[in-house]
Amino acid sequence: MRTLLRTLAKPFTETAGLARWMLVIGLVMTSLFVVLAIFAPWIAPYGFAQASSGGVDFPKAGAPSGDHWFGTDRLFFDVYSRTVWGARTAIEVVILSIVICVVVGVPLGLVSGYYGGWLDRVLVLVMDAMFAFPSFLLAIVFSFLLTGLLGGTVLAVALSLSAIYVPQYFRVVRNTTVSAKEATYVEAARAIGASDFVIMRRYLLNNVVQSVPVLGTLNAADAILTLAGLGFLGLGIQSTDAAEWGHDLNRALADAGSGIWWTGLYPGLAIVLLVTGLTLVGEGLNETLNPTLRVRRLLPVVMTPREER
Amino acid sequence: MPTKPETPDADAQGAGVEAGPIIDVRGLAVHYGLRGGSLARLFGRDAGVVKAVDGIDLTLQPGEVVGLVGESGSGKSTLGRALLGLAPATEGSIRFRGQDLATLSRRRLRDLRRHIQMVFQDPSAALNPAMTVEVAVGDALRVHGMRSATERRAKVVDALERVGLSPVELFLEKYPRDLSGGQKQRVVMARAIITGPSVLVADEPISMLDMSVRAKILQLMLDLKQDLGLTYVYITHDLASAKYFCDRIAIMYLGRIVEIGPTEEIFANPRHPYTKALLRAIPDPDPGRQLPRDLPRGEVPDAAAPPLGCAFHPRCTEAVASCGWESRDLRTLVEAHWTRRTPEAFEAESASVGSLDHLDRPATSATLGKDGPEAIKGFLDQVRAEAPDDPIWTGVQTITDEGSGVRVHFHEGVDPALRRAGGVDVACVLYPEEPSGV
Amino acid sequence: MSFATSNEPTLEPSSEPVISARDVRVWYGTTRGAIRAVDGVSFDIAPGETLGLVGESGCGKSTLGRGLMGLLPPGAKRDGEVWYDGKDVLSMRAKDSYRLRGTDLGMIFQEPLTRLNPLLRISAHFEETIKQHEPGLSKQQVRQRALDALRQMGIPPTRYRSYPHEFSGGMRQRLMIALALVLQPAFIVADEPTTALDVLVEAQIVQILNDLRRNFRTSLLLITHNVGIVAEACDRVAVMYAGRIVEEGRVSDVFENPQHPYTRELLRSTISLRTTGLNFIPGSPPDLVDPPDGCRFHPRCPDAMAVCATRNPINIERPTGGRVECWQVGPRDQIPSGGTRPLKQEELAVADEA
Ligand SMILES: Nc1ncnc2c1ncn2[C@@H]1O[C@H](COP(=O)(O)OP(=O)(O)OP(=O)(O)O)[C@@H](O)[C@H]1O
Ligand SMILES: Nc1ncnc2c1ncn2[C@@H]1O[C@H](COP(=O)(O)OP(=O)(O)OP(=O)(O)O)[C@@H](O)[C@H]1O
Ligand code: SF4
Ligand code: SF4
Ligand SMILES: [Mg+2]
Ligand SMILES: [Mg+2]
């Protein structure tokens, strides 16, 4: 337990300067949204698709007021509530898609890198092709396909986002595996009689997933943008299924000309803040976990006066 | 992946102390295909094969310590790894208690590895950085099917105590990075002995350690041998520790054993010129000693294109006509000459001799020169006058005129096989077959 | 043999030292505090003399070598004086000390391949090195100088335009030496130049280093783990322990008659052809963030006395020349009364030792 805490605290204790501040600020911003996501039902005064309360209809595109802090939109929805609920959707989608990426990308990369041969060559080719494909286009294609199959659900969108990021996890894990499998400790594992599965599971896995957390946070930021982009195009999650910032932005587009600024500002701000927060965490983590970038906090050397010898 | 806990015959092997060799290697060859990488192709080298181990016979009697000594690239590690089935044999057989490794399935081979274990050169690299000492040592049991964690822990504690890591509690939870080099090597040893092996292949176990720790680890290995009745294959390039540690020593050069015999005999009476050279080159703390001047030249040749005849001939100070002289030796000779010339003389001579690159293709005759036969003959005479005792001249049969230069014909070489000489076996033409029955 | 053996004095009493270090300290900043890797080291090296520096791993040998050259990582601090050619190298401006490096002070590293640029031909390496320090030379002169240096190292001029990877390990090490030599420095630090090499190649390199000081009167600080190499290639030896030179003197003298218990135990624990039993020093070198009080060797010293645990030993002249710091050797009159009773050592577990 203590070692776990120490490991978790490592990015703080071992960094200095900019990296540390990026990490701290990023974490504060990100956790704000996580709190919103978890406690949305209590924080948001209304539901995300609620147009009336206590029999009283909400005003249509009403300006911010005491009842509706961020105003309401043309569908009578409360903008504040939708922004809060939107955090939940965003976090759900991102977590789900990262889990899918890790579950698919890491084992594939491990197996591919460890065994090599034709399997490796085919997988690398497929993944490289996916990676080379413009990612947003790929997301659009997949969300077309998947929403057709699964409807405009969180799962469908998460899956289509995963399609973009899996190749990255695959490549990182595969390349580290290819070099890690040459390590003496792998040979040593073979020498004690370990099977290939045991070697991959107990010897390689821990050592090749080191860069996954960094990749995960950086991808999370990207995923938020892509999700919003899909919503903005009217793809992905529908307004009645869940609150989604990109979708709200799309609808706010028409408002902008008529001086209704509040429907667009708040979802937009939410996107910017969360993306910034996640990026800061990712970059901060990168600098602390990546030894080539890390600037350790060294105690200054104070040479004591010479002792008598 | 659950492994079958015991294989019946493996158990029988573990129990019986039978006579005869514990390991019997016959005609073993391990060849690696060179994957002509883009770099190699770029430089015009074709993919060939490296004969890392090239025809080795070796028997290990129970309780014996056999040393494999040789320079880098001589195939010591490959031979050691082949004994565990980690390097696939291209030819020949390895028998462990009469059982041929090549006939075993992958699963049975893995089971066998609890009887033959290995210790590595770099203790920091040999331990998984993500495993604690307890997990790392216990994993040897886990892969052989011991599922109970408490049982494993008891055995781990026992093994760590045996290798001198006590109090054990201090070490169980440590990661390799928290240990010193010597401590790591002790952990590696604990992992090796925990499955109760009978043979331990120690691949340069002390060469990466600090000098003050080496003696401790060597002592530990001796203690373990005593307590557990181990048989060792001790791989090293350090003859001094081999002398202290081994019962028998095999000197290896480019994938072959060139001399093998009892330690005392090898040191008292080295026969092979390579053995002699190694012995003379050992730096000795005795300040009265001086390095000999007649050290072998050059370095271990590229194993992918070994010298013709006796592989040691380009460096051998005692070489004779039949040692396998060839075109590449001519190049070495001429280039060595040029390192002694002034730059002006070099420019002039190099212009008259022309390119040497064609000499890189091994052949027992070679052309040289582009300024006419007389000029080249004069040049060669001059080279010869500079070092008339260079053994290459014993190998030159004739020099004939050819085209704008000369053709140097060498004597046909022989590849000496291991032959009995005194109490040892030597592979050198200077030691011809003794009459049988010695 | 026609030349002087290594143990003949090459140092005339009158000759001025090429380099002399006075009370040099190099400390590293870490997250735990300062590592006192070098803590008050003094020595002189005469022209053409080789000083061997031995000691266990982590006692500050490389740090001392790099400190002399001014090649220290950020966060490290050094003080003391290093006199070369009438100037204190340590108090020079960075630009001046850079100019001195290479032309006057050279360095040979352990792993040559990491110091050679794989994409550059050997010729380019030489051209770059020479041009940097002597920009006035013509291309022909540069080539001449380079070929000369290579020739001395036994590398044929035909290989001048090859790439580093086309050479074997020993040849690369000779290339490194040639690169260090081409500017004809008066003083070279060689940090374990043979550790990665085979026995026979190692012997070749040792011979080259031997020839070097004879032919060019180059002074050498040879850092090594191998006391055998010191015996064969050095005039004097300095034994380093926990950041300090604890004994220093002529090689034959120190090895035959070690005064400091550490030197003695180190020599005894070395495995050589004459080894008939294994000896070792109990324990391991101390943590240099907080080294032991008094003599830093006292927790491991078989001869330790009560005074050793509290008072720093005094640096004195060895009976047969050189210096040593150990209470057993002296000065007796400075040991407080009762200080000579044997120190009771705490039991060292085997585990602490390795
Ligand atoms: N997996 C491999 N693939 C290709 N070639 C190999 C492989 N392993 C070893 N070799 C080659 O086989 C030869 C012998 O290597 P080996 O490691 O057995 O030598 P060694 O005697 O142990 O040397 P060292 O003292 O450097 O450890 C070398 O030329 C090496 O390059
Ligand atoms: N860049 C660095 N930053 C912090 N500490 C360092 C650094 N380099 C070395 N040290 C520490 O300084 C001490 C002396 O190290 P140094 O490399 O000089 O020892 P050494 O005698 O050369 O050892 P070796 O024989 O292993 O090369 C060690 O405790 C080491 O951990
Ligand atoms: S056969 Fe003997 S003499 Fe001839 S080169 Fe080989 S080792 Fe030297
Ligand atoms: S001063 Fe004392 S502890 Fe230090 S080496 Fe001498 S006798 Fe040993
Ligand atoms: Mg090896
Ligand atoms: Mg060092």
Image: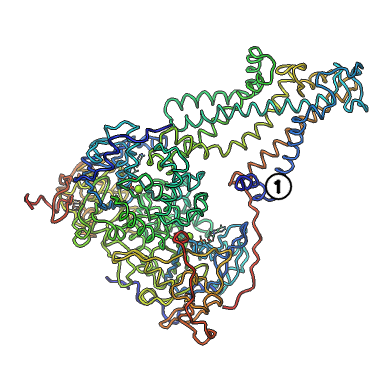
Q: Position of residue A255 (x, y in %)?
A: 86, 19
Q: Which residue is mark 1?
A: A18
Up-down relation of residue A120 to residue B216 (above or below): above
Pick the residue in front: B18 or B260. B18
Q: Position of residue B112 (x, y in %)?
A: 32, 38
Up-down relation of residue B348 to residue C279 (above or below): above
Q: Chain of mark 1?
A: A
Color style of the picture: rainbow
User: What kind of residue is marked 1?
Assistant: Leu
- Side of B132 where B103 appears, left or right: left
- Tell me what residue is drawn at x 35 percent, y 72 percent: C6
| Quarter that holds the N terminus of chain A | top right
- Side of C128 where A97 appears, left or right: right
Q: Is residue B375 visible?
A: no
Q: Position of residue B41 (x, y in %)?
A: 39, 35
Pick the residue in front: C271 or C123. C271
Up-down relation of residue A231 to residue B75 (above or below): above
Pick the residue in front: C7 or B51. B51
Q: Is residue C309 visible?
A: yes
